Amino acid sequence: MKKTWVCAQKQQTKIKEELLKQLDNITLTNTTLKLSVDLEDLIKETTEEVIDPTIYITADAYIKMITLIQEYDTEVAAHFLVRNIDRQYIIRDVLIFPQTVTGITADGVDIDYQTWLHNIPEEQFKELRGHVHSHVEMDVTPSGVDEHYYTGLMSQVPDYYLTMVINKKQDYHIRLYDVTNNILYTELTFKILLSDDKTVSDWLADYKELIVKPTPKPTIHHARVAAQSYAYGNTYRQQSLYEEHDPWGYASDNVVTYILGNEKTNKIKPCASLTEAAEYIKDQLNTKVKTKTILKALKEKGFFGDWSVEVSYEYN
Ligand SMILES: [Zn+2]
C-alpha cells in the first residue's frame, strides 16, 4: 500500500508552514536561497493518525465482476456499491450502467447514463462509491483517459471513492481516494468476503492440515559401509553392500568402492560394534536379509572391530 496526498489545498498550507519555518532559521549570506520540503516525511507526519484501510469484496460482487470481465472481449465498466465500516471498505455489489464499449473504451452514454443514475434507489445511491473497468488483455495501469475521468469524478466525491482496473488475467489496480483525510491509497489488494463474514483465504487456511503432500521417500541406490576401523589403525575403507542383483557384491570384483560425494543425502552412524553396524545396515536397506547374514558378509569382506557406517541415498 502506498499513500500520496490528494486535494492540494490543505497540504499547501502545510508546505508553506514548513518553508516559513526554514526561512526563519536561515542566515542570509549568499546570493541564492534553497529551501526544500521532504514530502514523504510530511505525508507520514500528517497521515500517521489515520488507520490504514482494508478492502473487501463480497463473494457475490466478486463473481459478478469476474463474470462481466470474462464475458466481454471489449472494455466494459461498472459501478461498485461500497460500504465503509471503520476503515473497512466493503464492495457489496456491482452495478452495470448503460455504456458503449470498444476495445479501448467503455463510456457511459450521456443521457441514458444520467437517467440510470437518477433511477437508482436512494440507499444504493448513498453507497455508489466505486468504478471498475476492464483493460481486457492489457496492463492494468490507468491510462491518461482514466486519470482524466478519475479527476473529474473526484470533484464530486464528498468522502471516499474506490477505482479498479482489472484484466482477464485478474491482474488489478485499486485506488482508494480518501477525500476526508486527503489521502490517495494505491497498490492496494482486496480480500474476498464470504456470506459468513469469513475471508476466502481464512476459510482455506482452516483446512490447511487436511491437505498433505507426501514427503518424498528415499530410494536407496547405494548403500555402502564407509568404515573406519580402529582395529586397523584408522584405515579408511569402504565396502559396497548393495547392488540390485547381488546385494553383497559376491559376484563383483569391485567390492571396495570409494564414495565420491555424488549422493544427495548421506546418513552416517558411528556403531559401537560390527553387529550394531549390521543391524543399522539392515534397517536402512529395509531388506529381508537377516542381520546375521549381513554380519557374516561384513566379516567376509574383512571388517572387524568397531566401525562407522555410512549409508548413501538418492532421492527420486
Ligand atoms: Zn482504462
Image (tube, rainbow, N blue to C red):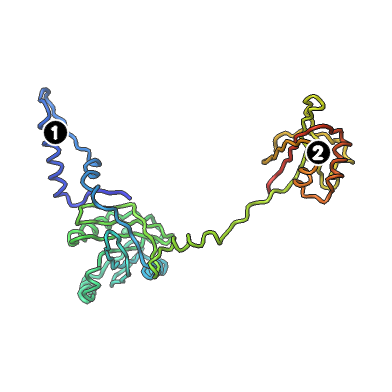
* In this view, the mark in front (2 or 1): 2
Give the amino acid at mark 1. Answer: Gln
Q: Position of residue 187 (x, y in %)?
A: 34, 52
Q: Looking at the rendering, which quadrant does residue 314 occupy?
A: top right
Residue placed at 77% from the left, 25% from the top? 234
- Determine whether 228 is above or below 77 in the image: above
Q: Position of residue 109 (x, y in %)?
A: 25, 70
State whether residue 73 appears in this view: no
Label 1, secondary structure: give it: helix
- Front in this rendered view, residue 294 or 32: 294
Q: Which residue is mark 2?
A: 240
Q: Is residue 266 left or right of residue 22?
A: right
Q: Position of residue 306 (x, y in %)?
A: 79, 32
Residue placed at 62% from the left, 55% from the top? 214
State whether residue 206 appears in this view: yes
Label 2, secondary structure: give it: strand
Asked whether mark 2 lies closer than 8 Å to ligand 1, one says no
Categorize mark 1 by other alpha carbons within 10 Å: few (<14), some (14-19), many (20+). some
Q: Position of residue 142 (x, y in %)?
A: 31, 55
> Residue farthest to the front?
272
Q: Which residue is mark 1?
A: 22
- Determine whether 3 is above or below 305 in the image: below
Q: Is residue 122 left or right of residue 305?
A: left
